[in-house]
Image: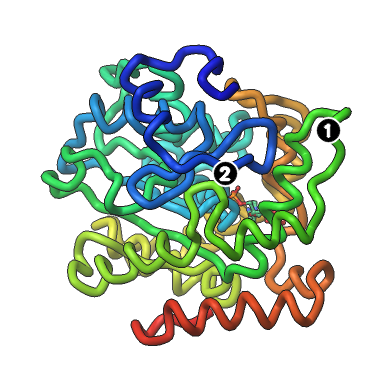
C-alpha cells in the first residue's frame, strides 16, 4: 500500500522493500532507514535531500526532534540573525509568516517528495530546519563548516506533544490514536525520526566533541533562562549582542516577539495552512514544561524515565 504513495522514485521504492516497516501514527507507514523511522513521503524527502542538498559553510541548520519546540527555535534564530535588517518588532516578517515558511525544512519541505529545491534565491547565511538524525545528514553537511543548532525536549512532554499533534493530522473518520498504543510505539523507538533517545544522543556526543560546530539546547532550559540561552545562541552563531543592544532591550524584544502568546495569537498562525498541508495552529498547543503529567499514568512516566536513564545517563545527559 505504501508503495502507492505519489512521487516515489524507483530508488525509494526499491529501498522501502528492504526496510523494516510498521504502521505509522497518522495514515502513512513508518520505515526504518539508517536506524531511524521515517514515514513514506518523508523517506523520499530524506533521500532527495541526501542526494541533492549542497551545504555551504555559512549555513545554519536548526536540527530538532519533532515537537521539541522547532517552531519556537526557527522564530528565535530568524529574528536573531536578521535583527539588523528587521529591527522593528512592529513590522517584522514573523508577524506575517509562520516560522516554518521563513525557515523551511529540508527533507520535509524543500526536498519533499522528489522535488529538488532551487536555493539560488536564498541569501547567506541560509537558515534551514531538519529533523534528520546525525548519521543521516547529507555528506555535504558533514563536509562543510556549517553550524548546527540542536534542540530537544524531555521525552515525556515530547511524546505527549507528538500524540496530540498526530491526532490533529488524522482525518476525521480515523479517530484519535490510543495513548497506550502510541506510547508503546514511542517507547520502542517507532516514532517520527525515532528512537528519540538515539537522535538526542547522536547530537549530544557531537556537541561534546565539536562544541564550535554543534550547540545543544533543551526546551526546558530556554523556558527557564530565556535571556541567557538566547545570548548563548547569539554567541555561538557569531552574532553576539553588543552591550548597547542589551541595554536597549534587543534581547527581550526578540523573546517577546517569539513568545508562545505572541506567535500563537497572530492571524497568520491562527488561520493559515502550510504548503505541506498542516494548519499553522497545530504547532501551538500549550507550550509548557511538564504537561505530560496531565496525560500519562505514573507508570508511563516511570517507564520513559527508566529508558532515559538507561540510554543517556552514562553519557552525562539527563532530562
Ligand atoms: P506542546 O504540544 O507541549 O504545547 P514543534 O515546533 O517542534 O513542532 O513543537 C511544538 C511544541 O512547541 C508544542 O508543544 C507547542 O505548543 C510548543 N511551542 C510552539 N511555539 C512555541 C513558543 N513560541 N514558545 C514555546 N513553546 C512553543
Please tell me whether residue 4 is drawn above or below residue 223 in the rendered image.
Answer: above
Residue 138 as seen in the image, left or right of residue 130: left
**Mark 2 and mark 1: span between their CA atoms?**
41 Å
Residue at the left extreme, as displayed: 143
Is residue 147 something that shows in the picture? yes
How far across and how far down the image is residue 90, in percent? 61, 39
Asked which quadrant contains residue 273, the reply is top right
The mark lying in front, picked from 2 and 1, is: 1
Residue at position x 81%, y 75% from top?
297
Q: Quadrant of the N terminus?
A: top right
Give the colouring mode of the picture: rainbow
| CB within 8 Å, label 2 to label 1 | no
How far across and how far down the image is residue 162, in percent? 67, 52
- Front residue of this view, candidates 103 and 141: 141
For the image, the number of numbered tags is 2
Asked which quadrant contains residue 183, the reply is bottom right
- Front residue of this view, candidates 318 and 191: 191
How far across and how far down the image is residue 22, in percent? 57, 42
Residue beneath disc 1: 174
Residue beneath disc 2: 89
Residue at position x 74%, y 56% from top?
181
Is residue 104 something that shows in the picture? no
Residue at position x 78%, y 61% from top?
180
Which structural element holds mark 1?
helix
- Front residue of this view, candidates 83 and 159: 159
Which structural element holds mark 2?
helix
User: How many neighbours does mark 1 have within 10 angstroms: few (below 14), some (14-19), or many (20 or more)?
Assistant: few
Residue 185 as seen in the image, left or right of residue 210: right
Asked which quadrant contains residue 279, the reply is top right
Amino acid at each position: 500500500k505504501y508503495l502507492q504513495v505519489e512521487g516515489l522514485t524507483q530508488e525509494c521504492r526499491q529501498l522501502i522493500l528492504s526496510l523494516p516497516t510498521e504502521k505509522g501514527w497518522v495514515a502513512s507507514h513508518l520505515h526504518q532507514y539508517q536506524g531511524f523511522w521515517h514515514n513514506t513521503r518523508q523517506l523520499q524527502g530524506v533521500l532527495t535531500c541526501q542526494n541533492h542538498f549542497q551545504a555551504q559553510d555559512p549555513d545554519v541548520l536548526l536540527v530538532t526532534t519533532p515537537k521539541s519546540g522547532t517552531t519556537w527555535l526557527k522564530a528565535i534564530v530568524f529574528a536573531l540573525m536578521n535583527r539588523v535588517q528587521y529591527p522593528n518588532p512592529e513590522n517584522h516578517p514573523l508577524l506575517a509568516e509562520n516560522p516554518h515558511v521563513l525557515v523551511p525544512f529540508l527533507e520535509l519541505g524543500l526536498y519533499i517528495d522528489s522535488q529538488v529545491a532551487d536555493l539560488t534565491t536564498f541569501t547567506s547565511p541560509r537558515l534551514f530546519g531538519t529533523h534528520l538524525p546525525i548519521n543521516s545528514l547529507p555528506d555535504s553537511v558533514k563536509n562543510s563548516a556549517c553550524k548546527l543548532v540542536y534542540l530537544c525536549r524531555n521525552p515525556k512532554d515530547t511524546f505527549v506533544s507528538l500524540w496530540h499533534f498526530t491526532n490533529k493530522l488524522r482525518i476525521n473518520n480515523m479517530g484519535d490514536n490510543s495513548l497506550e498504543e502510541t506510547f508503546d510505539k514511542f517507547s520502542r523507538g517507532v516514532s517520527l525520526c525515532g528512537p528519540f533517545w538515539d537522535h538526542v544522543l547522536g547530537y549530544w556526543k557531537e556537541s561534546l566533541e565539536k562544541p564550535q560546530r554543534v550547540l545543544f539546547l533543551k526546551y526546558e532550559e530556554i523556558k527557564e533562562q530565556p535571556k541567557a540561552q538566547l545570548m548563548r545562541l547569539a554567541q555561538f552563531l557569531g552574532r553576539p549582542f553588543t552591550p548597547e543592544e542589551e541595554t536597549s532591550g534587543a534581547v527581550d524584544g526578540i523573546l517577546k516577539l517569539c513568545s508562545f502568546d505572541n506567535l500563537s495569537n497572530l492571524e497568520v498562525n491562527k488561520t493559515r495552512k502550510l504548503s505541506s498541508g498542516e494548519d499553522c495552529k497545530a504547532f501551538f498547543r500549550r507550550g509548557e514544561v511538564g504537561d505530560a503529567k496531565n496525560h500519562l499514568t505514573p507508570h508511563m512516566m516511570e517507564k520513559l524515565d527508566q529508558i532515559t536513564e538507561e540510554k543517556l545517563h552514562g553519557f552525562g545527559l539527563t532530562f
